[in-house]
Amino acid sequence: MKITEIVLTPIAFRDPPLLNSVGVHEPLALRTIVEIHTDEGVSGLGETYGDAGHLERTRKVVPALVGLDVYDLNGLHAAVAGALGGVVGSDQHGLTGQMTGIGTVDRVFSPFEVACLDIQGKHQGRPVVDLLGGKVRDAVPYSAYLFYKWAGHPVTGDLLAGSSNVTVPDQWGEALDPAGIVAQARKLIDEYGFGSIKLKGGVFPPEEEMEAIRALRTAFPNHPLRLDPNAVWTPDTSVKVAEQLDGVLEYLEDPTSSIEGMAEVAARVDIPLATNMCVVSFDHLPPAVRQNAIQVLLSDHHYWGGLTRSRSLALLCETFGIGLSMHSNSHLGISLAAMTHLAAATPNLRYACDTHYPWNSEDDIVKPGALSFVDGAVPVPSGPGLGVELDRDALAVAHQRFLDTDIRSRDDTGYMRRVEPSYERKNPRW
Ligand SMILES: O=C([O-])[C@@H](O)[C@@H](O)[C@H](O)[C@@H](O)C(=O)[O-]
Ligand SMILES: [Mg+2]
């Protein structure tokens, strides 16, 4: 079954002003939608990052993939590696860890692999979960992903003109203190039924973020809690926080940077440490295992080379006694479907997965119906392949948004500086 054509459509969708350790989300986030067409008339979908560098690398490999068989995933991976010719990318904002050569290949390969699995599933009349080993759960639990945030994006005349005085409030409201974070959690949990909570930290001094965690514990006594400051604490600060939140958090995510830094903290604390920053490609695993740096890995098929490689990663984690969770960046429904099929086929994925979806779902480019949240979990779409269909009108709107904006790469720090010119990026900050 040969690939006859690949269409890449860069899109932009609205994103609230979510704060993190390097700044704040811009009003629009970028993705690229991948459509693969075949000589048998079956087509498949993938979704990946939309930043300029990644888009360019993704475009670069397309000619090498046309003519290949959608069942030859090894051949496709080799073709991507060959076309990239050893190039090493960067995610610039740096929140998904340091990229390596193999990590770059895996990142570019991923949406093509997902689209090929979508085609294989449609061809065989089976959902993707069946191609990954079969369903071990009917629905995949996700966590309420909380962010400190402004009431809305600052606006003066044009969208990015930059004054912090005027804002257009969004439906989520402001969350800059424990009460705001608890209110945000309540809204997400009321609407989606989430049974776990993650707070994106690294925004305020650790004492304030611990206060927010304690407020969440009081408000939601039975919800497992996580805190993720994206590696802006020193090892000593990380140890202090871990000691004070021992018994409160199910895991502490990326408190400090590097495998060595995480190993130092892990040796001094009891609380499990999780990462989606210091172990982000296969060549990071041996040193992380040798140094006992992490207890939980947040996998992410977008940079671990797609769904089949993520299944291999799960097995490696099981082998080395590392727990498995799932990471998310801003994304739409094709990614949510892929994440759900993967998690449903991964027996040792025992933590609720992260998802940004509630923050961005209003601009989704898949037709409604296939994806829903029931008690905080997404039932595995039952249709063949990924089980989702493109909404061509919504895709056209999202592509036009991309054409109309100047944003070509995610730049949380640059956007923050337009609003607060004295903002400095620091690592470690505390
Ligand atoms: O979207 C964000 O601000 C997150 O901080 C994201 O970029 C991270 O990659 C991610 O969610 C994480 O868990 O580190
Ligand atoms: Mg993280």
Image (tube, grey):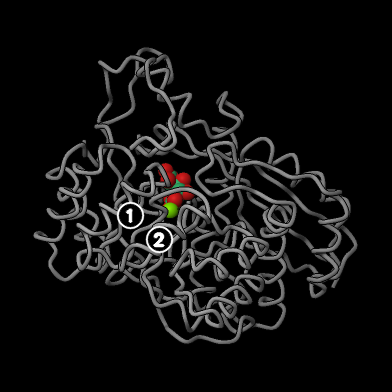
Tag 2 secondary structure = loop
- Can you say whether 22 is above or below 246 in the image? above
Category of crowding for the residue at label 2, using alpha-carbon neighbours closer than 10 angstroms: few (below 14), some (14–19), many (at least 20): many
- Check disc 1 and report its element: helix, strand or loop: strand
* Relative side of 426 to 217, left or right: right
Q: Residue at x 64, y 58 (%)?
A: 46
Tell whether circle 1 marks a residue whose Cβ is less than 8 angstroms from ligand 1. Answer: yes
Locate residue 177, reporting x and y percent. Answer: 17, 39
Badge 1 amino acid:
Tyr
Residue 363 visible, this orientation? no
Disc 2 residue lies near ligand 1 with CB under 8 A = yes
Q: Nearer the viewer, residue 8 or 146?
A: 146
- Residue 181, x across and y down, in percent: 19, 46
Q: Position of residue 228 (x, y in %)?
A: 36, 52
Q: Give the answer, above or below, for where 128 lies relative to 357.
A: below
Location of mark 2 (residue): 354
Question: Total marks drawn?
Answer: 2
| Quadrant of the drawing holding the N terminus | bottom right
Indicate whether 238 appears above or below 27.
below
In depth, the one of 63 and 299 nearer the eye is 299
| Residue 255 percent across, percent down from the top left | 38, 51
Left/right placement of residue 32 relative to residue 198 reads right
Q: Which residue corresponds to the image point at 43% horizontal and 70% vertical from the top-left?
A: 295
Q: On the picture, is 243 further left or further right than 138?
A: left
Amino acid type of the residue tagged 2 in the rendering: Asp
Looking at the rendered structure, which numbered label has been put on residue 145?
1
Query: Do the residues bearing badges 1 and 2 touch, measured as CB atoms within 8 Å?
Result: yes
